[in-house]
Image (spheres, grey):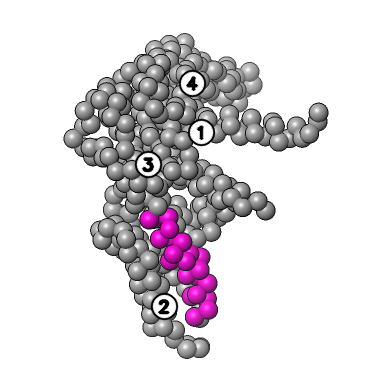
Amino acid sequence: MSGVDFGGDMDEMVNRYLSELNAALGRLAPPRRDQLVGEIRDHIGHMRLERPPVDLSDMEALLNRVGLPEDIAAVALEDMEEPPALPVSVAQFGPPPASSPAPRRASLPGRAWHAMRARPALAWMGAALGVMALTIAGLSVWAVSEGPPGFVVNSIVRAPADVMPHVLVVPNLVTVPNDQGLSAADAAAADAKAGLRTAFVDVVSNAPAGTVVSQSPAAGSLVPGTSTVVLTVPQASTSTS
Amino acid sequence: MVPGRTSQLAQMRKGALEYCVLALLRDGERYGFELVRELSAAELVTSEGTIYPLLARLRQDGAVETSWKESSQGPPRRYYKLTTEGKAALEFFSAEWQRFSAAVNGILNAGGGR
């Protein structure tokens, strides 16, 4: 037992840090504030467990790595602003589902994201129509992917005060089939059915020739339509092994 | 340095950081501390605590979902997992980022060759 036990002082330092953080987060709704402070407390606990600080200045260095309370608060508070109002014409494409908050007319600044989850009418529009609708609504479309069949599957409105409002239209995504164990031809057919292309990598192996042994991306992955699935297929081994 | 330039860069980093978080979750769920450690090791964050508000935002946006799990050491941990929506956003960003960075590199590396 060499040196002084700083444990109590360290705990006090942490408590002081957390109460400063709590104060800096004053404008955040209490449940979110408590949650964030709790997460930071756990994080500090974890750091102390991983490499226990040897003295108070070491503890201070640890807290510096966590960051200044006001810096953490700044990130937390910039999300606090209300999502920007959606132009009514966009909202008219379909009633917002019960799970998402109704668009509000508040026009607060900030960099809030507002994910238009499951906005059915827009979601199943063709991409071209969706873009047109959004353009008419006064939203500039930031990016559109061209994966056929080109339906909008998701859109995210991001309207920070310092950037033009824009909409992200996510491409049509398909699920990669499980090609492993299939013959090369059957695997290619399964990929084609899913709307995907197929490429083969031949390897010399003792595994049964002509049968897919591995694939990338993995079965069940979500990928943009027309992506290529790379299949590894052993060729008949020429060596006697 | 021109005022405003550094803040633009900070905005860019911040935007990309969100997708780095999603990318770290691509192969399965992880808990907050692990995520922060990886990002910090990659020098993507300096103030580790700032990741937590970002995780809260991703959760609010529906890009990730969380669950609590018991841990063999210490308190239960909150695990983060990509949602289908998060996966879609990540796929989209990766493709766009490849295109964008290739284009920017092309211009940057060409220099003032005219």
Q: Which mark is residue A13?
A: 2
Q: Label 2 near label 3: C-beta < 8 Å? A: no
Q: Nearer the viewer, residue B95 or B4?
A: B4
Mark 4 residue crowding within 10 angstroms, few (<14) / some (14–19) / many (20+) = some
Asked if both marks, 1 and 2, belong to the same chain, the answer given is no
- Mark-to-mark CA distance, 4 and 1: 13 Å
Residue at (81, 28) in percent of width and height = B114
* Residue B7 at x, y percent in the picture: 56, 51
Q: Is residue B24 left or right of residue B69?
A: right
Q: Amino acid at mark 4?
A: Ser
User: Secondary structure beneath disc 1?
Assistant: helix
Which chain contains the residue that carries disc 2?
A
User: Secondary structure beneath disc 3?
Assistant: strand
Residue corresponding to mark 4: A227
Mark 1 residue crowding within 10 angstroms, few (<14) / some (14–19) / many (20+) = some
Which chain contains the residue that carries disc 3?
A
Q: Which mark is residue A113?
A: 3
* Residue A123 at x, y percent in the picture: 31, 24
Question: Which badge, 3 or 2, comes first in the chain's sequence?
Answer: 2
Q: What residue span does the magenta drawing correspond to? A: A56-77
Q: Amino acid at mark 1?
A: Ser
Residue at (56, 46) in percent of width and height = B8
| Farthest residue, direction left | A98
Question: Which badge, 4 or 2, comes first in the chain's sequence?
Answer: 2
Residue corresponding to mark 1: B94
User: Secondary structure beneath disc 4?
Assistant: loop
Q: Mostly what secondary structure, the magenta segment?
A: helix
